Image (tube, helix red, strand yellow):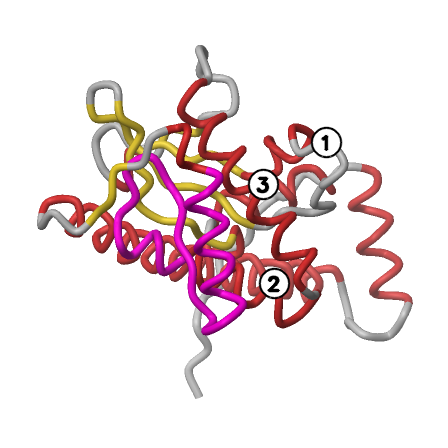
Amino acid sequence: MEVGVVATRNVVLSQHQHELVDLLVRSGRYQNASEVLREGLRLLERRESEDAARLAALRDAATKDWSDLADGRYDDITDDNLDGCIGQLGARAARAGWLMVGYRLTRVAQADVIDILAWSEAEFGEEARKRYETLIANGIRDAASSTSDVGHITRPEMGEGVFSWHLAQSRAVAAGQTVRRPRHFLICRREEEVLVVGRVLHDAMDPRQHVESQQTRD
């Protein structure tokens, strides 16, 4: 039987990592340090694959928002009408599981908000839906009015001039109506003085959220 030649590598570990490898080997789950490192690489490979799948899904989602814009499927909303628009969508979500939001809001983004608010009411009740309505409206205003790049994450992989804004950055604005852990972000771009909201997506779709979370734990 032929045995493949396996290359050896010198790996430098931190003290914490060295102690962790020893602990795992002593537990009996792994026979030696090589098995521990191979398992770590398998997990990393799986995470990279999952992140690539999330990014592909995110890119696919983004193509729908800008095609809506090109085909004229959007609504222009003034600042004075923004709260009323979100409230109307919340009422639609309560009645039929639908909703929308935006300054220039593509139809697919409207469908995103409808789904979000319908789920919020179904899971947590009418007051929770109304708090999320306020948060979404505040998030759109913040994304449009920010005078610096703080809070904006550029997304060149999703198109020229595209950026995202996470709703967690706008929760403090909703005084007395704070959403504890917002999980959605806006996909936006500017067209002259108009903020275009293309999608409102759950952050589980965004590989960057997982990378930043892992780095924070490390």
Q: Is residue 87 magenta?
A: yes
10 Å neighbourhood of mark 3: few (<14), some, or many (≥20)? many
The amino acid type found where label 3 is placed reads: Leu
The disc at residue 120 is 2
Mark 2 is on which residue type?
Answer: Ser
Relative to residue 214, is residue 145 drawn left or right?
left
The answer to whether 145 is drawn above or below residue 15 in the figure is: above
**Dot 3 or dot 2, earlier in sequence:** 2
Kindly check if marks 1 and 2 are in contact, taking CB atoms under 8 A apart as contact: no
- Which secondary structure, mark 3? helix
Residue positioned 62% across, 38% down in the render: 168
| Residue that carries the numbered disc 1 in the rendered image | 175
Earlier in the chain: of badge 1 and badge 3, it is 3
Image quarter where the N terminus lies is bottom left
Give, as a single range, the part of the protein colored magenta.
Answer: 83-112
- Kind of residue at badge 1: Ala
Q: Main secondary structure of the magenta part?
A: helix
Query: Badge 1 local density, few (<14 within 10 Å), some, or many (20+)?
Result: few
Give 80 or 7, whichever is nearer the viewer: 80
Q: Name the foreground residue: 217 vs 9.
A: 217
**Is tag 1's residue or tag 2's residue first in the polypeptide sequence?**
2
Which residue does the image show at 52% across and 51% down from the upper left? 203
Give the distance between the C-alpha atoms of the residues marked 1 and 3, in whole angstroms. Answer: 10 Å
- Spatial CA distance of label 3 from label 2 is 12 Å
Question: Which residue corresponds to mark 3?
Answer: 135
Kindly state the secondary structure of the residue where label 2 is placed: helix
